[in-house]
Amino acid sequence: MMIRKKSLVKNIDLEKLAVKLTEWVGTPASIIVHTFLFIGSFLVYFLGVKFNTILLIVTTVVSLEAIYLALFIQLTVNRTTESLEDVGENLEEIQEDVEGLEGGFGEIVEDVEGLEGNIKRIRKNVEGLEADVEDISSDIDKFYLEEDREKHQEGQAHIESSKSLQNIEKELITLSNGIIALRDDLEILKKNLP
Protein backbone atom coordinates (compact mmCIF):
# COMPACT_ATOMS: atom_id res chain seq x y z
CA MET A 1 0.00 0.00 0.00
CA MET A 2 2.82 2.40 0.87
CA ILE A 3 4.65 1.49 -2.35
CA ARG A 4 1.57 2.43 -4.44
CA LYS A 5 1.22 5.78 -2.63
CA LYS A 6 4.89 6.58 -3.16
CA SER A 7 4.63 5.51 -6.80
CA LEU A 8 1.51 7.64 -7.27
CA VAL A 9 3.20 10.64 -5.63
CA LYS A 10 6.28 10.19 -7.86
CA ASN A 11 4.05 9.97 -10.96
CA ILE A 12 2.23 13.14 -9.96
CA ASP A 13 5.53 14.94 -9.30
CA LEU A 14 6.92 13.69 -12.61
CA GLU A 15 3.80 14.88 -14.45
CA LYS A 16 4.04 18.30 -12.80
CA LEU A 17 7.69 18.54 -13.82
CA ALA A 18 6.84 17.53 -17.40
CA VAL A 19 4.09 20.15 -17.58
CA LYS A 20 6.41 22.85 -16.23
CA LEU A 21 9.13 21.88 -18.72
CA THR A 22 6.61 21.91 -21.57
CA GLU A 23 5.46 25.37 -20.57
CA TRP A 24 9.08 26.58 -20.20
CA VAL A 25 10.23 25.32 -23.63
CA GLY A 26 8.07 27.88 -25.42
CA THR A 27 9.39 30.90 -23.47
CA PRO A 28 12.03 33.47 -24.48
CA ALA A 29 14.18 32.24 -21.58
CA SER A 30 14.31 28.79 -23.23
CA ILE A 31 15.48 30.32 -26.50
CA ILE A 32 18.24 32.24 -24.71
CA VAL A 33 19.39 29.17 -22.74
CA HIS A 34 19.50 27.01 -25.90
CA THR A 35 21.39 29.68 -27.80
CA PHE A 36 24.05 29.91 -25.09
CA LEU A 37 24.32 26.12 -24.85
CA PHE A 38 24.89 25.77 -28.61
CA ILE A 39 27.43 28.58 -28.67
CA GLY A 40 29.10 27.17 -25.55
CA SER A 41 29.26 23.68 -27.04
CA PHE A 42 31.21 24.99 -30.03
CA LEU A 43 33.48 27.12 -27.84
CA VAL A 44 34.84 23.97 -26.17
CA TYR A 45 36.74 23.49 -29.45
CA PHE A 46 39.19 26.12 -28.14
CA LEU A 47 39.70 24.01 -25.03
CA GLY A 48 41.10 21.20 -27.18
CA VAL A 49 38.02 19.07 -27.86
CA LYS A 50 37.93 17.68 -31.40
CA PHE A 51 35.35 19.20 -33.74
CA ASN A 52 33.96 15.75 -34.68
CA THR A 53 33.38 14.97 -31.01
CA ILE A 54 31.58 18.29 -30.52
CA LEU A 55 29.35 17.61 -33.53
CA LEU A 56 28.63 14.07 -32.29
CA ILE A 57 27.64 15.33 -28.82
CA VAL A 58 25.58 18.25 -30.17
CA THR A 59 23.81 15.95 -32.66
CA THR A 60 23.06 13.41 -29.93
CA VAL A 61 21.77 16.08 -27.53
CA VAL A 62 19.63 17.68 -30.25
CA SER A 63 18.18 14.26 -31.17
CA LEU A 64 17.37 13.48 -27.54
CA GLU A 65 15.86 16.92 -27.13
CA ALA A 66 13.70 16.39 -30.24
CA ILE A 67 12.48 13.07 -28.80
CA TYR A 68 11.59 14.75 -25.52
CA LEU A 69 9.91 17.64 -27.32
CA ALA A 70 7.78 15.10 -29.21
CA LEU A 71 6.88 13.48 -25.88
CA PHE A 72 6.03 16.88 -24.40
CA ILE A 73 3.89 17.67 -27.41
CA GLN A 74 2.04 14.36 -26.99
CA LEU A 75 1.57 15.10 -23.28
CA THR A 76 0.07 18.48 -24.18
CA VAL A 77 -2.19 16.88 -26.81
CA ASN A 78 -3.41 14.32 -24.26
CA ARG A 79 -4.14 17.00 -21.67
CA THR A 80 -5.93 19.12 -24.28
CA THR A 81 -8.00 16.12 -25.34
CA GLU A 82 -9.03 15.51 -21.73
CA SER A 83 -9.95 19.17 -21.35
CA LEU A 84 -12.00 19.07 -24.56
CA GLU A 85 -13.83 15.95 -23.35
CA ASP A 86 -14.64 17.76 -20.09
CA VAL A 87 -15.86 20.77 -22.06
CA GLY A 88 -18.01 18.44 -24.21
CA GLU A 89 -19.56 16.90 -21.09
CA ASN A 90 -20.20 20.37 -19.67
CA LEU A 91 -21.85 21.43 -22.93
CA GLU A 92 -24.12 18.38 -22.79
CA GLU A 93 -25.11 19.25 -19.22
CA ILE A 94 -25.75 22.87 -20.21
CA GLN A 95 -27.87 21.70 -23.15
CA GLU A 96 -29.92 19.48 -20.82
CA ASP A 97 -30.37 22.43 -18.45
CA VAL A 98 -31.51 24.64 -21.33
CA GLU A 99 -34.00 21.99 -22.43
CA GLY A 100 -35.28 21.81 -18.85
CA LEU A 101 -35.67 25.58 -18.80
CA GLU A 102 -37.59 25.46 -22.07
CA GLY A 103 -40.04 23.02 -20.46
CA GLY A 104 -40.37 25.34 -17.46
CA PHE A 105 -40.96 28.23 -19.82
CA GLY A 106 -43.88 26.36 -21.37
CA GLU A 107 -45.41 25.96 -17.93
CA ILE A 108 -44.94 29.67 -17.28
CA VAL A 109 -46.69 30.48 -20.56
CA GLU A 110 -49.61 28.27 -19.50
CA ASP A 111 -49.73 30.01 -16.12
CA VAL A 112 -49.73 33.42 -17.82
CA GLU A 113 -52.58 32.30 -20.08
CA GLY A 114 -54.48 31.22 -16.98
CA LEU A 115 -53.83 34.60 -15.40
CA GLU A 116 -55.11 36.32 -18.53
CA GLY A 117 -58.36 34.35 -18.19
CA ASN A 118 -58.66 35.45 -14.56
CA ILE A 119 -58.03 39.06 -15.56
CA LYS A 120 -60.78 38.85 -18.19
CA ARG A 121 -63.21 37.51 -15.58
CA ILE A 122 -62.26 40.29 -13.19
CA ARG A 123 -62.83 42.89 -15.90
CA LYS A 124 -66.28 41.45 -16.58
CA ASN A 125 -67.02 41.58 -12.84
CA VAL A 126 -65.87 45.20 -12.68
CA GLU A 127 -68.07 46.07 -15.66
CA GLY A 128 -70.97 44.41 -13.89
CA LEU A 129 -70.21 46.43 -10.76
CA GLU A 130 -70.15 49.64 -12.78
CA ALA A 131 -73.57 48.81 -14.22
CA ASP A 132 -74.88 48.07 -10.73
CA VAL A 133 -73.49 51.37 -9.42
CA GLU A 134 -75.26 53.19 -12.26
CA ASP A 135 -78.44 51.34 -11.39
CA ILE A 136 -78.06 52.33 -7.76
CA SER A 137 -77.46 55.97 -8.71
CA SER A 138 -80.51 55.87 -10.88
CA ASP A 139 -82.49 54.23 -8.12
CA ILE A 140 -81.34 56.84 -5.60
CA ASP A 141 -82.31 59.65 -7.94
CA LYS A 142 -85.72 58.08 -8.48
CA PHE A 143 -86.05 57.58 -4.77
CA TYR A 144 -85.53 61.24 -3.96
CA LEU A 145 -87.84 62.40 -6.76
CA GLU A 146 -90.60 60.05 -5.81
CA GLU A 147 -90.21 60.65 -2.07
CA ASP A 148 -92.12 63.87 -2.31
CA ARG A 149 -94.89 62.37 -4.47
CA GLU A 150 -95.60 59.09 -2.89
CA LYS A 151 -94.44 58.19 0.54
CA HIS A 152 -95.71 54.64 0.34
CA GLN A 153 -93.34 53.96 -2.59
CA GLU A 154 -90.50 54.79 -0.25
CA GLY A 155 -90.45 51.24 1.00
CA GLN A 156 -90.25 49.81 -2.52
CA ALA A 157 -87.35 52.07 -3.49
CA HIS A 158 -85.57 51.02 -0.35
CA ILE A 159 -86.11 47.36 -1.24
CA GLU A 160 -84.75 47.95 -4.75
CA SER A 161 -81.73 49.72 -3.28
CA SER A 162 -81.23 46.83 -0.89
CA LYS A 163 -81.42 44.39 -3.79
CA SER A 164 -78.92 46.46 -5.75
CA LEU A 165 -76.66 46.60 -2.72
CA GLN A 166 -77.01 42.85 -2.37
CA ASN A 167 -76.07 42.50 -6.06
CA ILE A 168 -73.07 44.72 -5.49
CA GLU A 169 -72.12 42.67 -2.48
CA LYS A 170 -72.36 39.48 -4.57
CA GLU A 171 -70.30 41.06 -7.34
CA LEU A 172 -67.71 42.22 -4.79
CA ILE A 173 -67.50 38.68 -3.39
CA THR A 174 -67.06 37.31 -6.92
CA LEU A 175 -64.43 39.97 -7.65
CA SER A 176 -62.66 39.21 -4.37
CA ASN A 177 -62.58 35.50 -5.22
CA GLY A 178 -61.18 36.36 -8.66
CA ILE A 179 -58.46 38.50 -7.07
CA ILE A 180 -57.57 35.70 -4.65
CA ALA A 181 -57.33 33.25 -7.56
CA LEU A 182 -55.14 35.72 -9.45
CA ARG A 183 -52.87 36.15 -6.43
CA ASP A 184 -52.56 32.35 -6.07
CA ASP A 185 -51.68 32.07 -9.78
CA LEU A 186 -49.04 34.79 -9.36
CA GLU A 187 -47.53 32.94 -6.38
CA ILE A 188 -47.35 29.74 -8.46
CA LEU A 189 -45.76 31.70 -11.29
CA LYS A 190 -43.16 33.20 -8.94
CA LYS A 191 -42.27 29.73 -7.65
CA ASN A 192 -41.81 28.38 -11.19
CA LEU A 193 -39.50 31.20 -12.24
CA PRO A 194 -35.77 30.22 -12.09
Image (spheres, rainbow, N blue to C red):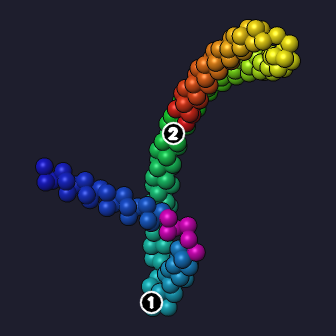
State yes or no: discs 1 and 2 in contact (Cβ < 8 Å): no
- In which image quadrant can residue 193 be found? top right
> Does the magenta run of residues contain 113?
no
Mark 1 packing: few (<14 Cα in 10 Å), some, or many (20+)?
few
Q: Which amino acid type is shown beneath numbered disc 2?
A: Asn
Observer able to see residue 38: no
In terms of depth relative to the viewer, which is nearer, 101 or 83? 101
Q: Which amino acid type is shown beneath numbered disc 1?
A: Gly
Question: In the displayed structure, would residue 74 be above or below residue 88?
Answer: below
> Does the magenta run of residues contain 27?
yes
Q: Position of residue 141 (x, y in %)?
A: 84, 20
Total numbered badges shown on the rendered structure: 2
In terms of depth relative to the viewer, which is nearer, 16 or 128? 128
Outermost residue, left side? 1
Mark 2 — residue? Answer: 90
Mark 1 — residue? Answer: 48
In terms of depth relative to the viewer, which is nearer, 38 or 140? 140
> Viewer-nearest of labels 1 and 2?
2
Question: In the displayed structure, would residue 142 be above or below residue 190?
Answer: above
Name the residue located 19 percent from the left edge and 53 percent from the top edge: 5
Name the residue located 54 percent from the left edge and 30 percent from the top edge: 187
Q: Is residue 138 left or right of residue 9?
A: right
Q: Secondary structure at mark 1?
A: loop
Q: Earlier in the sequence, mark 1 or mark 2?
A: 1
Give the magenta-colored segment's residue range: 23-28
Q: Position of residue 6 (x, y in %)?
A: 20, 57
Observer able to see residue 136: yes
Name the residue located 15 percent from the left edge and 53 percent from the top edge: 3
